[in-house]
Image (cartoon, coloured by chain):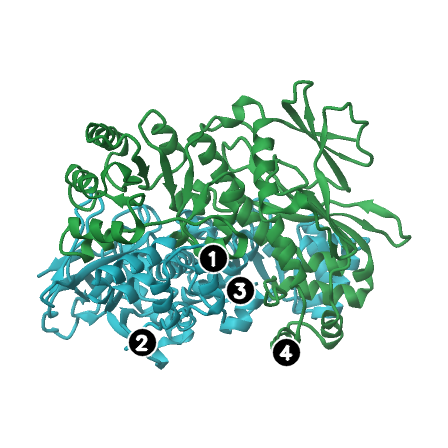
Chain colours: A green, B cyan
Amino acid sequence: MESTALLTDHYELTMVEAALRSGAASRRCVFEVFARRLPEGRRYGVVAGTGRLLDALEAFRFGDEELARLRSSQVVDEQTLDFLAGFRFTGDVWGYAEGECYFPGSPVLVVESDFAHGVLLETLVLSILNHDSAVASAASRMTSAAGSRPCIEMGSRRTHEEAAVASARAAYIAGFATTSNLEAGRRYGVPTAGTAAHAFTLLHDDEREAFAAQIASLGKGTTLLVDTYDVPTAVATAVELAGPELGAVRLDSGDLLVQARDVREQLDRLGNTGTRIVVTSDLDEFAIAGLAAGPVDLYGVGTSLVTGSGAPTAGMVYKLVSREDSTGTMVGVAKRSKDKQSVAGRKFALRRRSSRGVAEAEIVGIGEPPTDDGDDRALLVPLVRGGERVDSEAHTLEAARTRHTESRAELPAAARRLQRGEPAIPTVYED
Amino acid sequence: MESTALLTDHYELTMVEAALRSGAASRRCVFEVFARRLPEGRRYGVVAGTGRLLDALEAFRFGDEELARLRSSQVVDEQTLDFLAGFRFTGDVWGYAEGECYFPGSPVLVVESDFAHGVLLETLVLSILNHDSAVASAASRMTSAAGSRPCIEMGSRRTHEEAAVASARAAYIAGFATTSNLEAGRRYGVPTAGTAAHAFTLLHDDEREAFAAQIASLGKGTTLLVDTYDVPTAVATAVELAGPELGAVRLDSGDLLVQARDVREQLDRLGNTGTRIVVTSDLDEFAIAGLAAGPVDLYGVGTSLVTGSGAPTAGMVYKLVSREDSTGTMVGVAKRSKDKQSVAGRKFALRRRSSRGVAEAEIVGIGEPPTDDGDDRALLVPLVRGGERVDSEAHTLEAARTRHTESRAELPAAARRLQRGEPAIPTVYED
């Protein structure tokens, strides 16, 4: 991985310079990542990006090229460049494990280090968590609405080319079955899928020729796109060419519910009871829910997924909540800016659960967590210790995917409502 | 640059495989990129990403690693892998020059090649143009609303870390003065800026100590953030420490218009008539317009910019519009899917202008463009010829920035209205 050190706001470096000069750069600090609120009407959020962040953190080094650029553009002085040349994050990081649900005020990441080390990470941490969590949070609503029917991520063309890779990963954590994005397959092992677009049909002299070419190459189990010209004609041609082994047909336009019913009837009448129906036209969680009563087997989701279904960023912030004072004592700090207050001090976080295992509250507090009554679940896990990544089976992508399923299942039923409302559980601050 | 070849949807490769087998892969094709509509109520869009696309195209090669992944995951067969191993785009590309305004149906990019070459580029082309154009389109409304006051791009933390770099570049094209993103400075030469965040004030034992540390490091001309505790107190401290040379104060919360007026009055009273006021709290084009009457000198814009101010993707599509038939004749093609129709055939595009140079219509047609009456402006320029990038002074970032200013200035006055409405000029199809 190339250096990630310049994926950083200019002011993080000028703050390091000024703090090195004032001597405050070495003060022990606690930074906290949290969202003041969920996107309007959402019931829960999903933490994603943690694994990518740990990769990016390992590549957060100022090499010769980065230093040369900072020198030539006079971002910081020579003393600061010397500091950056040797920079390697040596602090500790805790966080909500990837795939975990979160709520307003949940301390989803906690960074403890000196000021210089902690402040340098701000931009990168937020970029990754805000993007990936926004996508995972939308994706979770879609897989929830889809129930047992698989969702296919296919939004690469509607977002930045690297954001597309991260989106595929985040969607997989939140329960999507496959992605169209090949790089997500290579980089993260997300299963990839795809067959053909309208261009393939238009390329050939007629639809029959196109379908025959696709079947010759991809087999009878392929998915044929049947809405380029006339749907019933295309379905008839598809069945004629592939027979009962035809894998699926795809609808990408028009009234999907009506068409899915018509196509299902036609397929069944032709004996293709095992041929599945894939729908893919501008779906979001609401459209998926609206198709629940229809004979649909798979949902392909693009634009709405990669743009967070109306909430393209999670709105998380990275705030200094505690730091050493001149006597070496840690003190809680918080700005008093209007509408942007934070809660001072190093936090713990627990998911309070009923004796039946249903989540009841997000407990956030300062100091020692209350004695566990056996039902509560601690939420902060160690991710980096003394600059070293804490490797664990718990941090794999598959573990995150499983965790998300479990974390969502534990929420009260209201969490799965798509209409706007309050967070599924309240956040309670305890002293 | 690393290979960009896998930043591609799975189905582009299966289509190549099937077309190689059917023999249609070598048919000459014309693909066109266009947006069916602008985001709701927008008056114009801005093409951006072209320069990034040309960079990415040069890196679109299937190396050993990419081929190994495609083989192990059985995406395509050996014959297709052999084809991909030697792949290098050899076609032609025309497009709207970067920074140009566009409208519904504008053929912003035209790719002419055989089917295999053209279809392989689809995902990458759309990812880049859809992202960068969405950001530039939002940015242009912001710089238009800001008038002669500079806008600072500072949204890196609210979007994917690489999308942040591209966003800074797109915003610069659309008239932003600077960015917070250091990588955009290194990679594209966008000027970077920044001073300090609330954390820097909170780090120190009091605000005075923090301001003194910042001034000692960054000079009296720096921008001091004055809303961590109490604004009037902070402004008084700032002026006391820096004197009349104080560069600027920044407001990041509360009622910005009221506060800007109060702060301006306080600064003037203290003799700091040259100290500027920067505002940065959740601004979008509407908030910028709302501050026009206030004594604000610079606008910092984050979230709204990188998320396209409500339209995070430009919604452009990549459609096969013409291809060779079995006799070698080029024929126009278009699918008939409901609500998703396209116009067949290779297009020309002109901006029709009045004798006074005001844009009147987007003329899109098939075949030879009408004879220019001297006022019309041809919009498609060559970008790639026979696989080779057309290098030109016209394709630099600075040229794109200048072009955008000129292209926007030429639109009728209605284009600069922020409220929802129709596109500023109609798109007229001519045969």
Q: Farthest residue toward the top?
A: A355
- Decide which of A426, B246 is in the foreground and name it: A426
Count residues near mark 4 (Cα–Cα under 10 Å), then give few for <14, some for 14-19, many for 20+. some
Q: Amino acid at mark 2?
A: Gly
Image-based side of B34 in relation to A194, left or right: left
* Residue marked by disc 2: B387
* Residue marked by disc 4: A68
- Decide which of A212, A82 is in the foreground and name it: A212
* Residue marked by disc 3: B179
- Decide which of B348, B21 is in the foreground and name it: B21
Q: Earlier in the sequence, mark 3 or mark 2?
A: 3
Foreground: disc 4 or disc 3: 4
Say which mark, if any, is on residue B195: none
**Vertical comparison of A24 with A384: above or below:** below
Count residues near mark 2 (Cα–Cα under 10 Å), then give few for <14, some for 14-19, many for 20+. some
Q: Earlier in the sequence, mark 1 or mark 3?
A: 1
Image coordinates for residue A96, horizontal then vertical, percent: 67, 41
- Tell me where residue B405 sits by quadrant: bottom left
Image coordinates for residue B333, horizontal then vertical, percent: 15, 56
Structural distance between the alpha carbons of marks 1 and 3: 42 Å
Image coordinates for residue A310, horizontal then vertical, percent: 44, 41
| Label 2: element kind | loop
Q: Residue at x 39, y 52 (%)?
A: A158
Say which mark, if any, is on residue B72: 1
Q: Which chain is indicated by disc 2? A: B
User: Residue B270: in sight, yes or no?
Assistant: no
| Label 1: element kind | helix
Q: Amino acid at mark 4?
A: Ala
Image-based side of A150 in relation to A378, left or right: left
Q: Classify the position of the N terminus of chain A by image quarter.
A: bottom right
| Label 4: element kind | helix
